[in-house]
Image: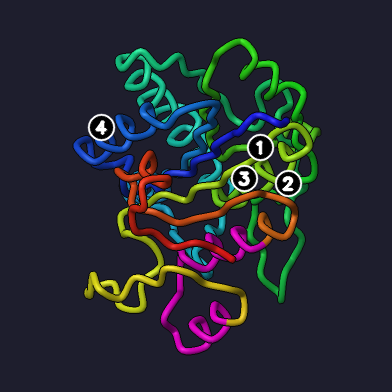
Amino acid sequence: MRKKLHIVKIGGNVINDSIKLKQFLMAFKALEGLKILIHGGGAKATKWGKKLSLNIQMIEGRRVTDDQMIDVVTMVYAGLLNKKIVAALQSENCDALGLSGVDANLILSEKRPLQGGIDYGWVGDPLFVNTARISSFIDLGLVPVLAPITHEGQGNLLNTNADTIANVVATAMVKKYEVHLIYAFELPGVMKDVQNPDSLIHRIDHAYYTELKSKGLVSQGMIPKLDNAFQALAQGVTQVCIIRFDKVNLLTQGHEYTSII
């Protein structure tokens, strides 16, 4: 029988709020069994980019990354935020190991080609996940904490969407584990109206997602999140859900969230 593995992706807005981050990390620590944490940090990267007077350009929740912006996202994601999260987990006696996709050749990507005439710059699309190396860390009793920076094997760093990394790591790890993928962020799940707490969508299939997107009820950062969620489910991940950041340990207790079906 394969062991259960939880892969949790946490959004950047939670990371930027010290109180919310502590609440999330307490819930993450309480999540039983084997686990991997994957984090973004887009809001913090945008903040630093603006401080440096850089051009910030987002297309459907995905960042255009030029020569200057790749330096910023690498420093913010793989440096500042990754180590803050690892230090916080260590303070809670959760033995975490901070990594990026570059370290130990964990995630090899290709530089994204032009798409519809759009040049995303130093943005990577994953090609390979080193599951044996990730498993070796887990077998040592460590909790890998992955920042969304990868490489293409030629010495260049690539900004890679954290929702995508969660998807590809989850689908790669199904060969060895029963994988449960959790996307955690500020809201209880996918909402028809973010201002109305009663508008939570409990279950969403691809047809319903397409309908919601056509009506503009899901947009921006939720689009890559849901695109990746459906891809992961199609590739053998046992469960995919979207849940509030401080409830990640309550999936089996009937807490409200959105299930991807």
Q: Are marks 1 and 3 in contact (CB under 8 Å)?
A: yes
Q: Which residue is mark 1?
A: 150
- Give the residue number, with chain letter if any, for mark 4: 22
Separation of disc 4 and disc 3 at Cα? Answer: 23 Å
Q: Which residue is mark 3?
A: 165
> Is there CB contact under 8 Å for labels 1 and 2?
yes
Q: Residues within 10 Å of mark 3 (few under 14, many from 20)?
A: many
Q: Which quadrant is the C terminus positioned in?
A: bottom right
Q: Secondary structure at mark 2?
A: strand
Q: Is residue 178 magenta?
A: no
Residue closer to the observer: 34 or 223: 34
Q: Is residue 93 above or below residue 192?
A: above
State how far apart marks 1 and 4 are (Cα). Answer: 27 Å
Q: CA distance from mark 1 to mark 2?
A: 8 Å
- For label 1, the crowd category at 10 Å Cα-Cα, with few meaning under 14, some 14 to 19 and many 20 or more, is many
Circle 1 or circle 2, nearest the eye: 2
Q: Which residue appears at 53% of the width and 34% of the height?
A: 147
Q: Give the Cα distance between marks 3 and 2.
A: 7 Å
Q: Residue at x 69, y 34 (%)?
A: 177
* Image location (x, y in percent) of residue 51: 31, 46
Q: Amino acid at mark 3?
A: Ile
**Image location (x, y in percent) of residue 170:** 65, 43
Residue carrying label 2: 126
Magenta residue check for 215? yes
Q: Quadrant of the N terminus?
A: top right
The answer to whether the residues at label 3 and label 2 have Cβ atoms under 8 Å apart is: yes
Q: Is residue 25 at all visible to an observer of this figure?
A: yes
Image coordinates for residue 121, horizontal then vertical, percent: 64, 55
Residue drawn at point x = 52 percent, y = 35 percent: 74
Between circles 4 and 3, the one closer to the viewer is 4
The stretch in magenta equals 208-230
Image quadrant in which you'd find residue 186: bottom left
